[in-house]
Amino acid sequence: MQRRLFALASTALAAVTFSTLTHAAEELRVMVHSSFVLPKPLLAQFEAQSGVKLAIIKGGDAGEMLNKLILTRARPVADVVFGIDNTLAGKALAAGVLEPTLAQAAGTVDAQLGGALAAVDYGFVTLNYDKAAVAKTGTPLPKNLQDLTLPAYKGWLVVPNPATSSPGHAFLLATIAGMGEEKAFAWWAQMRTNGLKVVKGWSEAYYTEFTRNQGSHPLVVSYATSPAAEVFYAKEKLTESPTASLNLAGGVFRQVEGVALIKGTAQPAAALKFVDFLRSAPVQQALQTEMWMYPAVPKTPLAPVMRHAAEPAAFESLPPQVMADQGGKWVARWTQVVLK
């Protein structure tokens, strides 16, 4: 996944990677996506209390990570995986790389994850806008996605490519879920002629093309938590975020991330301890301002800065199996409509 680089840029020293450790009986090999980061003291505390030595392996973005697990399923390179979300759960289940009883054993079945992963966090891919840049245009914010096809909004929006970006893919899924496949691709075709900017990943969209960072596009596909991250990492103290979410129907997608045992692991007991750890109160608190996601465990208090990251009142979703069956076709069609 190419999101949440707010945290990666500022808290890299708080993360810990043990991928160079030699695999031994008491070690637990944990595959995670590239956006995974937790405070080093929390990881050390888990090791001390559980007697489990963590070997954390960064597997790239979530899609790349899952592909690695599929390619190595005959001889698994990990015991447990964190970061497979509801857009990939169907593919993971169909590939047979997950132990299907994990969520039940942990007591945390989540329908959005196909019932095989225990939910750890969730987030919303949505549009974000630069308040100052929009005010400067003198144009009111669009009230719906169709407004963005009007001449007044020509060149406003930058999106990450859904073929190479997790948030870009989620935004594509939102448009299809919200408008239906044919209307969604008609909208994308109209956006192409109205100055839509497409870039490879979220970091380029947000840090290069977005007007908040001296780009030329006041509207970007990002996360509902991005305004809170703007406040959290600001050099000066802010009482209000310079950006805000624009939650339009058909433009908001809820991602749920989970943790699962890898089929064939020799460390199921240790893996279940790690599942409990990820769902423990300290981790559920920390992930909010480390990975900029909402905690999946109910009644977890929100970090104060998350008041700048209100959850959208409505969002789109699709069954995991539908995304597994249709996702590749939709990305290919999007490429033809928008880029060819």
Image (spheres, grey):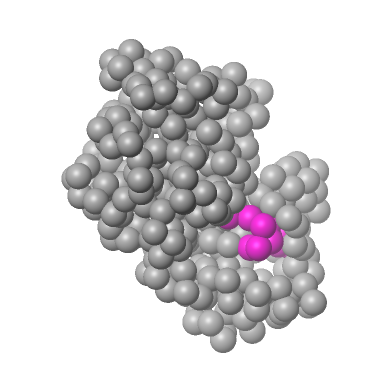
How far from the left and from the top, in percent, is residue 218?
71, 54
Residue at coordinates 63% horizontally, 55% vertically from top-left? 165
Q: Is residue 199 above or below residue 324?
A: above
Q: In this view, does 114 lie to the left or right of 289?
A: left
How far from the left and from the top, in percent, is residue 245?
54, 52
Q: Within the image, what quadrant is residue 24 found in?
A: top left
The C terminus appears in which quarter of the rendering? bottom right
Q: In this view, does 161 lie to the left or right of 24?
A: right
Q: Can residue 27 be seen in this view?
A: yes
Residue at coordinates 41% horizontally, 65% vertically from top-left? 94
Q: In this view, does 229 lie above or below 131?
A: above
Residue at coordinates 46% horizontally, 25% vertically from top-left? 23
How far from the left and from the top, in percent, is residue 217?
75, 56
291, 313: nearer the viewer: 291
145, 138: nearer the viewer: 145
Residue at coordinates 55% horizontally, 49% vertically from top-left? 68
280, 267: nearer the viewer: 267
Does the magenta-highlighted stretch encompass residue 161? yes
Residue with the most extreme bottom position? 182
27, 48: nearer the viewer: 27
The magenta span reads: 156-166
Q: Is residue 165 left or right of residue 24?
A: right
How far from the left and from the top, in percent, is residue 95?
44, 61
Q: Within the image, what quadrant is residue 67 found in?
A: bottom right
Q: Is residue 292 visible?
A: no
Does the magenta-highlighted stretch encompass residue 252? no
Q: How many marks?
A: 0
